[in-house]
Amino acid sequence: MPDLSSLRNRPEFWLAAVIAVFVLALSLATPSFLSISNFVDLTESYAVQAIMATGLFVVLIAGGIDISFAATASVAQYVAALLATRFGLSPILVIPAGLAVGTLLGFINATLIHYARVNSIIITIATMNVYFALLMYATGGHSIYNLPEWWSERITFLQFETAGSDLVRITLPIVVMVASLGLCWVLLNRSKTGRQLYAIGGNAEAARRIGLNISRLQFFAYGFAGFMAALAGLVQANRVGEAVPNALYGTELSVLSAAVLGGASLLGGVGTIGGITLGILMLAIIQNGLNLLDISPYCFEIITGAIILASTSLTAVSVRSRTRSRLVEEAPNV
Amino acid sequence: MTAPVFLELRNVFKTFGNFQALRGIDWDVREGEIHCLVGENGCGKSTLIKAVSGVHAPDAGGDMRIAGQEILSFDPMRARALGIQVVFQDLALFPNLSVAENIAFDGNLGRGLSPKAAIRRKARETLDRLGHDLPLDLQVESLSIAERQIVAIARGLAGSARLIFMDEPTASLTRAEVRRLLDLVRKLSAAGIAVVFVSHRLDEVSAIAERITVMRDGRMVGTYPASALDQRTLIHLMTGIEIASHHVARDCASRDVVLEARHLSRRGEYDDVSLALHEGEVLGLTGLLGAGRTELALSLFGMTKPDSGALIVHGQERRFRTNQDALAAGIAYVSEDRLNLGINAEQSIVDNLDIAVLPGLANRFGLISDESRTQLAKNWVARLNIKLSSVEDAINTLSGGNQQRVILARWLASHPKILILDSPTVGVDIKNKEGIYALIRELSDQGVGILVISDEMIELFATCDRILHMRNGRIAGEYSPSLITEQALEERIYA
């Protein structure tokens, strides 16, 4: 049982507290906020970003960063849509093909990072531009509207009516999101590979000396991020019923801020799935609240930018003050 | 009675490019013995450790045997399987993982599910064997340095070690922690595990070693029974030179005070510090790592602001806003962490040397000519006897000792009246240290007041007229080198 002081050192604790305050404030301001149906709608609209966040999170833990995942998701989604419409392939072929494209793009990132030995943020900003520009060039920006029914149809796993006779549906995006978060949790906390990823993110040199294969783990992390991005792309097309090449463009920053907000360190090795989930929830609530309060959507971007600034500088300041106060405390007592 | 040989090397060479790091090593370590390996920086100790732990393969032609078995191909995994473990100087731990996972990380190698329970069990057993109790679920980054060291040793032990190398394990420990570590080493040895201990602290070496091996320039100078060597003989074997005897401390109390601190405090760093530095005096400031010495120096140099107290320079009270103010007041500071904070490694010697005095080189149009810069650099290179081929070369082409002189020249070029030297010979070989000591004495003869921050007794006694001892952010005592011995002062510092 962790005591309160160790709980207070965890970003998840503070995030949960801030979320509670927001929920309270928003439900006082707009009565429609605190309802099951609003909450489920909110979850569904953020499911795609949450799935991408799990992939990004694995890369962050391994000490890297990936900015290209939204472009990867778009490419994988469009390739799969082409296979389904122009060639009329069945889902048994289309879905694995889409996921394979995403994984492949992730491997390309890992190859460049590993062999060119360039900082991963530079490489993935570059590949983001290349992947996305290639997609726009090849498609001319045209969307695919005639997705087959198996893909575009809304798949509901559970539905019920609330007391206020709102219809609530638990749909595919929510189920895939929960499954992705679960898979990622098992991977990072229960598998040997996951613990190795934490190890290389914590101290890559020590990991090398203990005999871990750093490049193989990097390939795994970026490949996993590509796979998750592709999954998110496929789910997104299901949600909106069409494949729009630039639909996901621009979500990089909010997914990244959700991860940072949830306590993932940009230096690697630190962060939890619970934190990421709370981070996404926080962003979802802010955006939803702004909508309900009829505030300009640009405010949301101001807020995500400010969140990254505030949470990274707060971490840096608290690390500095901790080292400073330790200087005298740690000196041996006479 | 002599124990059987566990590790045996015959005629081992290791070449990097055209540099021979190991030149025909013949060496053996016996089962369960405590063996110290000493030598200057760059003598090949680290390369030797890497060769016998599988990190670097030695050149073909040598012969390596472990427990009598000839080793043909080798890598870190195989070295560990044969019972060779290394506790690296940087410990090589995972700060973000728990104590248990750091100790028994081997359980996480391969694929499949992480065996959490087995890892905890293994970690617990190993800590029990060491007689230490650490919370298994605590993250390593929240441990003290001494506790982290225990974790690193436990990791070695968990891999069923028969020989553990410890590379400079005591560098950042307090005296009490060192004693506990040495006890632990004896315990390992009693359990039949050999320990090779690499250290610069010669008193520790003679306290625990059964045999001492001295290395120099990639060769074995020899292996000696510990009882046969004293400190000065050991230095002589390591460097081939005799260290100069002490200089005579001068009494400078009657001279003008150039720098004075009155009740200076900064929360969390140092507390109620008063000191006076006289013209031409060399004042030593010693104490444990974290006692607040460097923090105090940073405030004297205007890099941080004291919370309270007064700073008086040449009789005038000063409040520095930045170190530019301190420079203007005639204060120069040579930082401890020269490699990270002091030099621009890729830039030329000229660039590194004149950076603090550039405005002074400008002509009336505010422009700086290359000749004036080169001339300045050449003057200082000649004065400080820095060995180099061209002042246009990158500074990282120089040896550590010569780099240190370039940095000294940088600050001397500003003609300081007050010079603060933070650990001036860290990373400098013993044979080059003497040259820096001579320079310090020469500058003080010219009237420069010098504050030397150091924890090397030989250094303090070779240069200082007075020594202040700092502990927990406060001045704990003042000593004259002519009235106390090196050993007695060291005892007080580590008490």
Image: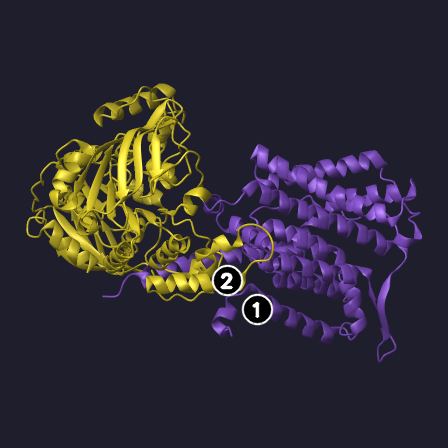
On the same chain, marks 1 and 2? The answer is no
The disc label shown at residue B367, or none:
none
Q: Amino acid at mark 1?
A: Phe
Q: Colour of chain B?
A: yellow
| Secondary structure of residue under mark 1 | helix
Say left or right for A155 vs A328. right
Q: Please give the residue where the numbered disc 2 appears in the rendered image.
A: B118
The disc label shown at residue A13, or none:
1
Q: Is residue B441 above or below residue B252?
A: above
Instruction: Classify mark 2: residues with Cα within 10 Å, few (<14), some (14-19) or many (20+).
Output: few
Q: How is the image coloured?
A: by chain
Which residue does the image show at 53% across and 62% down from the upper left? B116
Of all chains in the rendering, the one displayed in purple is A
Q: Amino acid at mark 2?
A: Ala
Which residue does the image show at 50% across and 62% down from the upper left? B118
Residue located farthest toward the bottom when viewing the structure as drawn = A163
Which image quarter holds the C terminus of chain A?
Answer: bottom left
Percent x, y of residue B420: 25, 44
Percent x, y of residue B35: 24, 45
Q: Nearer the viewer, residue A209 or B256?
A: A209
Q: What chain does mark 2 sit on?
A: B
Percent x, y of residue B127: 38, 63
